[in-house]
Image (cartoon, helix red, strand yellow):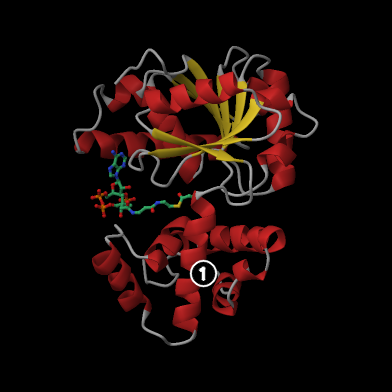
Amino acid sequence: MTDSNAPRTAAVIGGGTMGAGIAHVLLAAGARVTVAEVSADAAAKARDAVANSLAKAADRGKLAATPNDLLAALSVVDTLADLPPGAELVVEAVPEDAALKRRVLAAAAGACPDAVLASNTSSLSVGALAEGLPGERVLGMHFFNPVPVQPLVEVVRHGGVADDLVARAAGWAEALGKTVIVVRDSPGFATSRLGVAVGLEAIRMVQEGVASAEDIDTGMRLGYGWPMGPLRLTDLVGLDVRLAIAEHLERELGPRFAPPQLLRDKVGRDELGRKTGRGFFDWS
Ligand code: CAA
């Protein structure tokens, strides 16, 4: 549904699972959206991912407009030089690599001089990402996978950000149909810190033979009302993503976030979860 409080023009850097989902919800709220990728091929794949996601939502009766009407407001580009100069909001959703995120945010700061620059990082310090940038324009807008379905955005504020920017970002997220929590810039924020803690403990329990992955997940689904168990969720998010976050949290918060050996072994064998066909479960 078009929401007049949504940004009119927005850009998303990175058209993977998260970027495509963020583009989906921006389009559905009536924004014109540009998704930037690194090559023509990746840009075409990003367009397909957004189209598939919109089609799924339409099949479930969740879209007020047709996917084709919404796709008419989508552009994909293969260079950050082609970001729309008039964008009000740029969300970066590139891999969880601080140097890469800093690089794309710096390019966006130059290409979109008036835009709020939001990082979708799930654990990195937003203040550190903002260093060397106009930091008063940078904050975290952390979306959840699958973005069209999960109703939360965690807005992350670092020291250099004024209340009105936080309120503006929160208003946009609400216009996308999301509920907002505002979290201080601290490692793993509120959600990743707790979600990863449970996920790592579940992996340690498999490693120690406490129960099977299936039974641990069933325990949390039926005993605690989780929509899916922590191990299937790890498969959905990606074991490599979870490992990178755990390593970062171990550095920042100490050994309680040390990644279990089983997680390292599986990543070493390319058992990354749903995207490679195997993780704690078989997805082939
Ligand atoms: N628009 C687009 N796609 C939609 C949709 C919509 N409105 N509604 C559903 N879908 C998709 C689902 O994502 C799912 O996709 P796949 O086919 O690719 O699996 C599919 O349609 C089936 O949806 P269902 O609603 O039928 O499936 P379900 O009832 O099993 O629910 C689920 C699936 C929503 C993923 C649910 O199991 C769930 O909420 N799981 C927990 C997810 C979670 O915890 N996410 C947070 C992860 S952590 C994170 O994201 C943060 C980070 O930084 C890493």
Which percent across, then down, holds residue 207? 49, 83
**Residue farthest bottom in this picture:** 209
Which percent across, then down, holds residue 250? 66, 64
Report whether the residue tagged 1 is closer than 8 Å to ligand 1. Answer: no
Figure quadrant of residue 224: bottom left
State whether residue 24 appears in this view.
Answer: yes
On screen, residue 245 above or below 150: below
Which percent across, then down, holds residue 175? 38, 23
State whether residue 272 appears in this view.
Answer: no
How many numbered callouts?
1
On screen, residue 199 above or below 71: below
Which percent across, then down, holds residue 198? 46, 65
Q: Residue at x 63, y 21 (%)?
A: 82
**Judging from the image, what secondary structure is the residue with disc 1 in?**
helix
Q: Which residue is mark 1?
A: 200
Figure quadrant of residue 284: bottom left
Comparing 189 with 281, the one in front is: 189
Figure quadrant of residue 251: bottom right
> Could you tell me the amino acid type at mark 1?
Leu
Q: Is residue 104 left or right of residue 246?
A: right
Comparing 51 with 26, the one in front is: 26
Q: Residue at x 25, y 28 (%)?
A: 63
Comparing 247 with 102, the one in front is: 247
